[in-house]
Image (cartoon, helix red, strand yellow):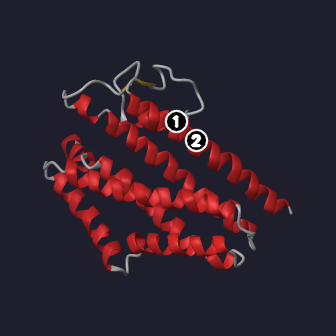
């Protein structure tokens, strides 16, 4: 049974990215611009919304291809095959969508919102994207080291698990420690800075605006 479980868990990386993809799709589906008053900012939001639909609409060609692609990757990796390049390509596409959604959140901050609950729901859907997205990037930075091909980008007290990188993202406000992972390379430090800025942006500005709208 343990052998079967190991086979099932082989594509753990794809499972995590697929969950992030689900939240990415949900964010776009909930991006109902009828809740935003007509302004030039709304025109930008409509462009971003159309771009996101290109990747997340399962009824469309690219969206359906990405969905099928995930299932193929899962089966391929379960069979013991390598899929590093394919996984990275999928991750880059997802990261592009996450950047667009981050821009959307900031545009919503300066837009007249007709339904205050709308912004709160978008925030709730975006939080898992932040956590899973940056967790994957931290994990990916250490991949070469795990393969014995490069130096450690992020060091921990003990051998890190997938959860270690998730905790690293969740504890971004905590100073670098070997318990939560110390960023050793410039790339890792840059990712941590971006992670911190996104958290301050989303949890600070967006949450305060959303709560303020609800109270009003």
Q: Is residue 187 left or right of residue 207?
A: left
The quarter of the image holding the C terminus is: bottom right
Quarter-of-image position of residue 52: bottom left
Q: Residues within 10 Å of mark 1 (few under 14, many from 20)?
A: few
Q: Report whether residue 31 is seen.
A: no
Percent of width and height locating residue 35? 69, 75
**Taking 155 as reference, is 53 above or below it?**
below
Dots 1, 2 in contact, CB < 8 A = yes
Task: Assign a secondary structure to mark 1.
Answer: helix
Q: Which mark is residue 183?
A: none
Q: Is residue 145 left or right of residue 109?
A: left
**Taking 184 as reference, is 85 above or below it?**
below
Q: Which mark is residue 197?
A: 2
Q: Residues within 10 Å of mark 2 (few under 14, many from 20)?
A: few
**Residue shown at 21% from the left, 63% from the top:** 72
Percent of width and height locating residue 105? 61, 59
Percent of width and height locating residue 15? 34, 53
Furthest residue in direction front, as rendered: 40
**Taking 176 as reference, is 38 above or below it?**
below
Q: Is residue 87 left or right of residue 114?
A: left
Quarter-of-image position of residue 5: top left
The mark total stands at: 2
Write down the residue under mark 1.
193
**Residue shown at 14% from the left, 52% from the top:** 79
Quarter-of-image position of residue 171: top right
Residues at marks 1 and 2, CA–CA distance in whole angstroms:
6 Å
**Residue shown at 69% from the left, 75% from the top:** 39
Percent of width and height locating residue 67? 32, 68
**Residue shown at 44% from the left, 61% from the top:** 97
Task: Assign a secondary structure to mark 2.
Answer: helix
Q: Report whether residue 71 is seen.
A: yes
């Amino acid at each position: 049974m343990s052998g079967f479980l190991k086979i099932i868990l082989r594509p753990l990386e794809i499972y995590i990215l697929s969950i992030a993809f689900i939240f990415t799709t949900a964010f776009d589906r909930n991006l109902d611009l009828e809740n935003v008053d007509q302004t030039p900012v709304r025109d930008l939001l409509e462009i971003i919304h159309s771009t996101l639909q290109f990747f997340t609409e399962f009824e469309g060609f690219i969206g359906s291809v990405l969905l099928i692609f995930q299932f193929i990757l899962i089966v391929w990796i379960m069979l013991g095959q390598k899929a590093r390049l394919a996984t990275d390509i999928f991750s880059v596409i997802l990261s592009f969508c996450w950047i667009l959604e981050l821009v959307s959140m900031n545009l919503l901050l300066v837009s007249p919102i007709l339904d205050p609950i709308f912004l709160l729901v978008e925030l709730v859907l975006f939080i898992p994207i932040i956590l899973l997205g940056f967790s994957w990037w931290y994990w990916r930075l250490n991949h070469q080291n795990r393969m014995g091909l490069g130096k450690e980008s992020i060091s921990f007290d003990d051998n890190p698990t997938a959860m270690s990188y998730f905790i690293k993202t969740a504890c971004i406000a905590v100073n670098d420690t070997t318990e939560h992972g110390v960023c050793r390379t410039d790339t890792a430090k840059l990712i941590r800075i971006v992670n911190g800025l996104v958290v301050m942006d989303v949890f600070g500005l967006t949450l305060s605006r959303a709560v303020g709208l609800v109270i009003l």
